[in-house]
Amino acid sequence: MPAYPDKPQPGDRVAILSPAAGLPAIFPAPYELGLSRLEKEFGLVPVEYPTTRVLGASPAARAADVNAAFADPSIKAVLTSIGGEDQVKVLRHLDPDVLRANPKPFFGLSDNTNLCNYLWNLGVVSYYGGAIMTAFGRGGAMEAQTAEALRAALFTHDEYELRPAPAYSDVDRDWGDPATLASEPEPFPGGGWRWHGPSRAVTGPSWGGCLEIVDLNLRVGTHIRQPATYDGCVLFLETSEELPDAAYVYRVLMAMGERGLLQRFGAAIVGRPKAWSLDNRLTPERKAAYTAAQQEAVLKAFTEYNPDIPLVFQVDIGHTDPQLVIPYGGVVAVDAPAGRITVRY
C-alpha cells in the first residue's frame, strides 16, 4: 500500500506547478486569487516554477519543474494550477528515484490523474483535488466543504468523513469576465448520494481519477500494473467538462473488465457527472438525462464484471463544486450499511 508523505505546516513553502497546462498565462485572475487564498487563509508560501505561467511548455520542461520541486528540501508540498490534456507525455521525463526518495503531498485532478497514478506506482499517496484555479480561486469565496477537506488533507493525517453536498454547481463561468470572481456560482440542490449493491463495508487503498485519463493510461499501458495489483482497492472515477457520453463511459469500463481489472476492486465511488460546459450548455432536463444515462452505463458494466460490490454515486469529487479531496492510494472506507465514506488524509 502507498505510504503517506509528511505534511506541511503553516509558514512552509509549497510548489505551485502547471504540469498539465499553463493556463495561468491566459487566465491570471482566478490563479492569483487562488494563490492569495493559499497564502492568507492557509498560511502557506507559494513558490512558482519556470513553466507555471507558460502556455505550451514542453513536456520535458514541465517534468523538470516537477523533479526540481520534489528534490528541493525546502518545499513541503506540491500543488497544481489546473488540469490539461497531454500530461501523459510528461511522465517519461520524470525522475522516479527523485520522487520516490523525496515524497511530498501532491495535489491535482483531471489530467493530473497521470501524476497521481505515477506516484501511486512509486508507493506514494497523493491527493485528488485542490486545484489552485478552481478550488482556491473560486468566485466569491472558497466553497465551505472544499476548504474544510483541503485544510484536513494539507495539514493532517486524520480520518475525515466525506459528506453529501447540500448544494452543488457544475456551470462554468467566463474567467475573462471580472464579475466571475466577484460572485459565487449558482447552486443547485445536492440530492444526496445514491447507493447500489450489497450492504457491506469495504476499506482499502484508493485508485482511479478522471475516467478519460484512466482510459488514456489504459491505452498507453506503460503505467498500468497487472490486475492483481488492485485487489481490494476502492475505485473512484469521475468525468470532465468534455461530457463523455454514456456509450464511451461503458466502453472504458468494459475494457477494464476485459483486462481483468474491474473485477479486482472491492468498492467503487462514482463522482457527480459534470453535465454543463461553456461548449455544451445543457438544459436542466438534458442534464438530468445525461446524469441518469451515465449512471446506467456504470451499473451495466459492474453488473457484468463485478456485481457484488458496493457502489456510491453522486459524490462531489473532481470537476464539480464542492471539490472534495480523495487521498489517491490512501485509506478509503466505503460503509454502505451506514451510508458513509471515510478517508484518511
Image (cartoon, grey):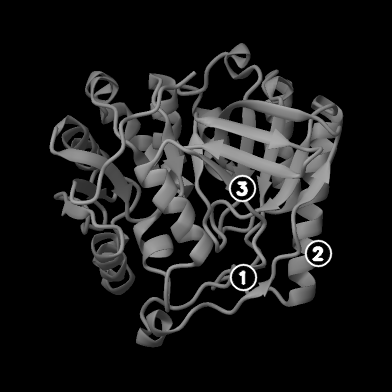
- State yes or no: discs 1 and 2 in contact (Cβ < 8 Å): no
The foreground one among 278 and 9 is 9
Rendered image: mark on residue 289:
2
Q: CA distance from mark 1 to mark 3?
A: 18 Å
- State yes or no: discs 3 and 2 in contact (Cβ < 8 Å): no
The foreground one among 186 and 171 is 186
Query: Residue 291: horizontal and vertical position, in percent?
Result: 75, 59
Quarter where residue 298 is shown: top right
Q: Is residue 52 above or below residue 112?
A: below
The mark nearer the N terminus, 1 or 2, is 1
Q: Is residue 119 above or below residue 151?
A: above
Query: Residue 157: horizontal and vertical position, in percent?
Result: 42, 35
Quarter where residue 63 is shown: top left
Q: Secondary structure at mark 2?
A: helix
Q: CA distance from mark 3 to mark 2?
A: 17 Å
Rendered image: mark on residue 280:
1
Type of amino acid at the residue the image marks with label 2 = Ala
Q: Is residue 135 above or below residue 297?
A: below
Query: Residue 333: horizontal and vertical position, in percent?
Result: 64, 33
Q: Secondary structure at mark 3?
A: strand
Query: Residue 209: horizontal and vertical position, in percent?
Result: 54, 40
Type of amino acid at the residue the image marks with label 1 = Asn
Q: Mark 1 against mark 2, which lies toward the viewer?
A: 2
Instruction: Give me the residue at 53% from left, 60% from top.
Output: 145
Is residue 108 visible from the viewing direction of this image?
no
Instruction: Give me the residue at 35% from left, 44% from top.
Output: 155
Rendered image: mark on residue 337:
none
- Residue under label 3, please give it: 238
Type of amino acid at the residue the image marks with label 3 = Glu
- State yes or no: discs 1 and 3 in contact (Cβ < 8 Å): no
